[in-house]
Amino acid sequence: MILNMGPQHPSTHGVLRVLLEIDGETIVRIMPDIGFLHTGIEKTCEAKFYQQVVPLTDRIDYLCPMTNNLCYALAVEKLLGLEIPPKAQWMRVLMNELTRINSHLVWLGTHALDIGAMTVFLYCFREREEVLKMFEMISGQRMMTSYFRIGGIALEPPLGFFDRVRKFVDRFDEKVDEYENLLTGNPIWMMRTKGVARITAEDAIALGASGPTLRGSGVDFDLRRDMPYSGYENFKFKVPVSQDGDVFARYICRVRELRESNEIVKQALDGMPEGPIKADAPGIVLPDREKMKTQMEALIYHFKIITEGFAVPAGEVYQAVESPRGEMGYYVVSDGTSKPYRVHMRAACLANLQTLPKMCEGGLIADVVAAIGSIDIVLGEIDR
Amino acid sequence: MPLNPAITDLEKLKGHPAVACLLAWNPAAVTGITFDRDEMTIYVDRSNVREACALLRDDPECTFNFLSDVTCVDLYPAEPRFEVVYHLLSIPKKERVRLKVRLESSSLAVESLTSVWPGANYFEREIFDLFGIRFTGHPYLRRLLMPEEWEGHPLRKDYPVEGYR
């Protein structure tokens, strides 16, 4: 029998349609069908100036906007050969890890909800709300932040921001204990996740899986540690790896990542350097409002950047960062004009979704829900 | 930080393990090379790309065991019009290399990598969908993002951003 699941199924986290060929309760074949959220972002990018692409990158993966901002900004900065001041780099790391916490909290809440643990959802969203309020405080937006710009960050963090982050991170470890109390030793949770939707390390690598989906199968690889960017080499953190390759292994990897991200935020707060938040690159970075109103040069640069953008030397760059879901990559091609010739996003979820048939075939229908939840898909990123 | 000029001389880049590996296997397979902004790009002949990737994956000096990304660039109206771009990653060596295949618009087909990395499946379907390039040997070459009955390939440069065709 062929069973259609989605695209409006609540456990598909968006609009994923899955075709299941079943024999009784057992799955014989599974075919994901995607594209319902395709908005043609890559095509739109080609018609915008470089700086106008930043808000579009938020909308790809709406659960981790800053990771996308960072990846795009790093790619264009590499094309330009821009040097970013240390404070901007540290702010980027700080915000990036808060974004990871935000994204993992949504994943944990909805994943537990899919499997039937309702309470965790409410607990996770309590903390997520606090993170979103911090995003609003620093960028004026809760979700589509566009806070990282080419050449630095948009604004100086407001007064009281660091205190608020400090208050959050000091207590966050206890909150993770709360989630773990509800789930990690829970017999129902163990039965639903242990030994379910297994995938071996060889299969995960061959299918292009990355992030916690790869590390849950025992491959110790994290771009933040192994190919550092944006000053990650200055931070000390562990990369959680689990050997089992099942839903529980991926769960435990992400929960430990929550704690590690929290540690990175603490280190970023402690060592935050002083200095400018934007690169010294007139003609590329927008001048301060103050200067714009007092200096003729700044006004001219402002006018030129807004009306005609800035030219980027011809070339091509592939920049990858570790997003909460895996390897997020931007391939940007420049032809020397002020609009990108081609922007391609390597979506971690698109590759991770390919592991679904390997995980589910031979298993039960009810485990498909657990498997989809465990690879943490965001359809906005898959379809772009 | 001023940009260094790109190196395109094959002789200077022979030391790179991926280049050395490909040259030792088949010198005719490498049609060009660029080292720019710390990124290595190797142009590979169209007929050799699948074998070249399998070689780079299995060679103990290279170990490019992870296919990060496959994408395409339309250079319209230049010829060869399309470049299919492969980004390989070596998890043990923590290195990347970019392979490129140039395609004339008269014959838009290249060998599929699905037999080397099954993960190439969706990436190649996406390129087939948005650029109209055929991948020979692909197990299920259907549109991925656009509807089945869609006409045209949206990411081609002669496809308008807005309005009707």
Image: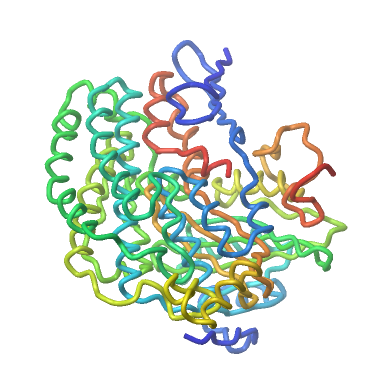
Judged left or right of residue B108, residue A124 is: left
Image coordinates for residue A123, horizontal then vertical, percent: 22, 31
Residue A215 vertical placement versus A332 (above, below): above
Question: The C terminus of chain A is located in which quarter?
Answer: top right
Image coordinates for residue A337, horizontal then vertical, percent: 68, 72
Judged left or right of residue A39, residue A208 is: left
Q: Nearer the viewer, residue A298 or A126?
A: A298
Image coordinates for residue A79, horizontal then vertical, percent: 55, 74
> Which residue is located at x 21 percent, y 57 percent?
A160
Q: Which image quadrant is residue A158 in? A: bottom left
Q: Nearer the viewer, residue B111 or B164?
A: B164
Image coordinates for residue A97, horizontal then vertical, percent: 30, 54
Residue A139 vertical placement versus A270 (above, below): above
Residue A46 vertical placement versus A126 (above, below): below
Q: Nearer the viewer, residue B107 or A90?
A: A90
Q: In the rendered view, how is the structure colored?
A: rainbow
Which residue reaches farthest right?
Answer: B106
Label count reads 0
Q: Which image quadrant is residue A213 in? A: top left
Question: The N terminus of chain A is located in which quarter?
Answer: top right
> Which residue is located at x 50 percent, y 78 percent?
B38
Q: Nearer the viewer, residue A82 or B77?
A: A82
Residue A22 vertical placement versus B123 (above, below): above
> Which residue is located at x 30 percent, y 35 percent?
A108
> Which residue is located at x 29 percent, y 70 percent?
A233
